[in-house]
Amino acid sequence: MSTIRISKPLRVLGFGAVSLIAVAGAALAADLAKEATTAGQHAGMAGSATDLKTLDSHLHMAVNCLVGPKGKGFDAKVANPCKDLGNGAIADAAGNAADQKILKQALAKAEAGLAQKDLAKAKSDAVATETLLKQVM
């Protein structure tokens, strides 16, 4: 039985290729903290809005960051400021029950704000959304 020997340059090349694949995979990994931060920023902008239209726009963006493009409640008519950060914070927190619970509470507050017709109440829900998201940032 013969042994196949791989020359040192090929072994190094093989290791380099594996390293490159590993780095590329890590670059594609979700960034939960950035998703939560971005959603929180938009919830904060919603909380500072002076009209329901602006408030709704920013809360929808927060929801889009939370649920991701495949999630329930995603609104393709509104920008997704988290489009390159992952699959939505809630999906990307899979395996982290504590963060997922907070993210789902933030989503519920954002949805409550979107359902409001009273600006003051909607702003209160937006601020509550931001406060919850700060726990995950």
Image: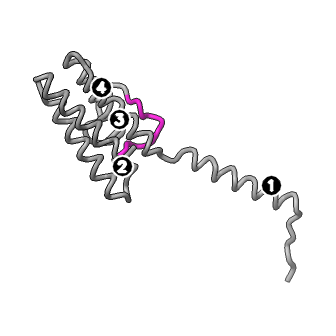
Q: Nearer the viewer, mark 4 or mark 2?
A: 4
Residue carrying label 2: 91
Q: Disc 1 to disc 2, how far (Cα)? A: 36 Å
Q: Nearer the viewer's eye, disc 2 or disc 3?
A: 3
Marks 4 and 2 close (CB-CB < 8 Å): no
86 within the magenta span: yes
At label 1, the amino acid type is Leu
Q: Quadrant of the C terminus?
A: top left
Q: Which residue is mark 1?
A: 13
- SS assignment at label 3: helix
- For marks 4 and 3, give the CA distance: 9 Å
Q: As shown in the figure, which amino acid type bears the numbered disc 4? A: His
Q: Is residue 32 left or right of residue 2?
A: left
Q: Nearer the viewer, mark 1 or mark 4?
A: 4
**Magenta span main SS:** loop
Residue pointed to by mark 3: 39
Decide which of tag 2 and tag 3 comes sooner along the chain: 3
Q: Mark 4 sits on what residue?
A: 58
Task: Give the side of residue 107 with respect to residue 5, left or right.
Answer: left
